[in-house]
Amino acid sequence: MKYYSGSMAELEAQVAHQLSKKRFEHCLRVRDYAQKLASQNQIDSEQAAVAGLVHDYAKERSDAEFLAVIGAKHLDPDLVNWGNPVWHGIVGAEIIKDELGITDPLILQAVRDHTTGAGANMSKLSQIIFMADYLESGRDFPGVQTARTITDEDLGQGVRFQIIHTLAYLAKNERPIYPKSLTTYNYWVTQ
């Protein structure tokens, strides 16, 4: 493989070893959906597959492990205030680099961006993983089919749909909103 030192089966085995069966199956579905979106948007299918498979690699790590990585890697000190929904992407990319040896900057950025977005700075690959995570075949929420249709027609409009609905959900449920998600919203709502 171009983005990992072993085969896809070997990468699957490493990811499966770190995750519950349910989370691993989600990662397989995200990988498959990412490949579909990559082919629709002229993006390297293998790159999308790797990013989709590893996007939640660190999802089930302990808070203590995330906090240790934030300190050791000298990441943004504000990260300590957020928790797993933010950490497993931003800090998870560092864990992926260290444990899996995946160094492709676009893959690592797509992992960082997959829950918060990145405003105007989202690569096509980041947009694909952001949407594949939201739309994979196991997802069943009101509006999912509309979101799939919009995304099939225009990837950027899919990103716009998701960030609007995600922030509305967080606000309605009085949940804190990570600043990068607000930046993403402010950019995409005007697109």
Image: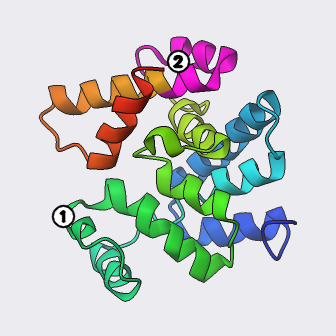
Residue 62 placement (x, y as % from top left): 33, 73
- Magenta span: 141-159
Q: Can residue 140 be seen in this view?
A: no
Q: Which residue carries the number 2 mark?
A: 147
Residue 124 placement (x, y as % from top left): 66, 40
Q: Which residue carries the number 1 mark?
A: 81
Q: Which residue is drawn at 51% across and 53% down?
A: 23
Badge 2 amino acid = Ala
> Mark 2 or mark 1: which comes first in sequence?
1
Q: Relative to the observer, which residue lies in front, 55 or 81?
A: 81
Badge 1 amino acid = Asn
Q: Outermost residue toward the bottom? A: 72
> Residue 18 in magenta?
no
Residue 104, quarter of the rendered image: bottom right
SS at badge 2: helix
Give the answer, above or below, for where 61 lies relative to 174.
below
User: Is residue 188 rendered to the left or right of residue 62?
Assistant: right
